[in-house]
Image (cartoon, helix red, strand yellow):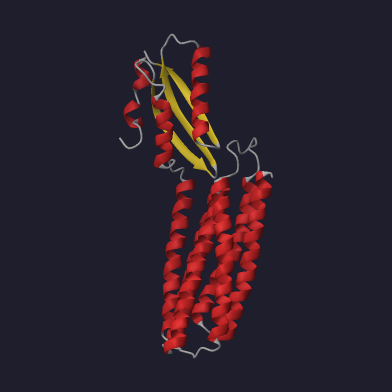
Amino acid sequence: MPLALAKNRIIYLSIAAALITMAIKFAAYWVTGSVGLLSDALESIVNLVAALIAFVALMIAVRPADATHPYGHEKIEYFSSGVEGTLILVAAAGIIYSAVQRLLHPMPLADLDIGLWLGLGAAATNFFVAKLLLRAGRQHDSITIEADAKHLLTDVWTTLGVLAALLVVKLTNWMILDPLIAFAVGGNIIFSGIDLLRRSFRGLMDFRLPGGEIAAIEEVLRRYVGEKRVYHNLRTRKSGSQRFIDFHLLVPGDMSVRAAHELCERIENEIRQRLRNTTVTIHTEPADELVSYQDVETSLPYGR
C-alpha cells in the first residue's frame, strides 16, 4: 500500500473515532449534567479538529521534493503538532473555566449509571484507535500521527479519571468531586499540550537527532577513521520522517576522487542501513592541509 494512502486511512479512522466519541460524551453530559463529562466532551472537539488538521498536514507532507521545496514538505508536520498542542491548551482553559463556574454554582447530577456506561464506551473506542495510531506513527515515523495517538491516550485516561470521580459521587454524594476532577483533567492536558509544543518547536528549529541515533552514526564513522582519515563538523536534523546528516571527512591528500567517492558511498550506505529515510551529505577535505582542521574542536562526537 502506498505510504500516502496508508497514512490517510489512519487519519480517516482518527476522524471517525473523534466524531463517535464526541457524540457519546455529549450524550453522557446531557444525561447527567456533569461538568466533568462536559470537560471530557470539550476535549473530544479538540480531538476532531486535531484529526482534521493532521489530515491536511499529511496530504501536504507526502508531496515529493520539488524545485521550490528541495528538502520536501514534511516539516509541515511540526506545524500540525504545534497547532494541536495549542488547541489542547485552549481546551484546558475552557475546562478549568467550566469547573470554576460549577464550583460557584453547584448543580445536582442525574442518571449517573447511564453516564458511566456511555463514558466507558467512549474510553474503549479511543483506546483501541490510539493503539492503532501509535503503532502506525512509529511505523511511518510520523510525529503528526504519533501526536494524535498520544492525544487520544491522554483522552482515555482523562475519561477514566472522570468516570472514577463520578462513581465516587454516586456512592458518597460528594458533589464537589465533579468540578474538582474537571480541574484535574484541565491540568493533565495542559502538560500534554506543552509537550507537543516543545516537540514542534524543536523540529521547526532543526534540533539535532536523538542521542541514540547520533551514537549509531558515530559507530559507523569510527570504523572508517584512522591516522589519515578524520571526520568533524557532524550536523543532524529531522524534517517529519526524513533525517538529514552532513559532516566533513578528512582523507589523504593523494587519494583519488574516485576512491574518495567510493569511500563516501560506503559510509552513506551503512548509515542509511542504520537509520531509515536518511539523506547523508559528506564534504571531503585533504588531511594534510591545516585549514581542514580549523573547526574540529567545535565538532566533537556526541556526549564528549
208 lies above or below 287 = below
x and y percentages locating residue 273 in the rendered image: 52, 32
- Where's the N terminus, which quadrant? top right
x and y percentages locating residue 297 in the rendered image: 31, 28
Q: Residue at x 43, y 83 (%)?
A: 168
User: In terms of depth relative to the viewer, which is nearer, 269 or 71?
Assistant: 269
x and y percentages locating residue 74 in the rendered image: 58, 44
How many labels, in total? 0
Q: Quadrant of residue 29?
A: bottom right
**In the drawing, does residue 114 fall left or right of residue 209?**
right
- Where's the C terminus, which quadrant? top left
Q: Residue at x 58, y 83 (%)?
A: 114
In this orientation, does residue 200 appear? yes
x and y percentages locating residue 62 in the rendered image: 64, 45
Q: Quadrant of residue 48?
A: bottom right
151 lies above or below 23 = above
In this orientation, does residue 80 appear? no
Q: Residue at x 48, y 25 (%)?
A: 267
**In the drawing, does residue 23 fall left or right of residue 235?**
right
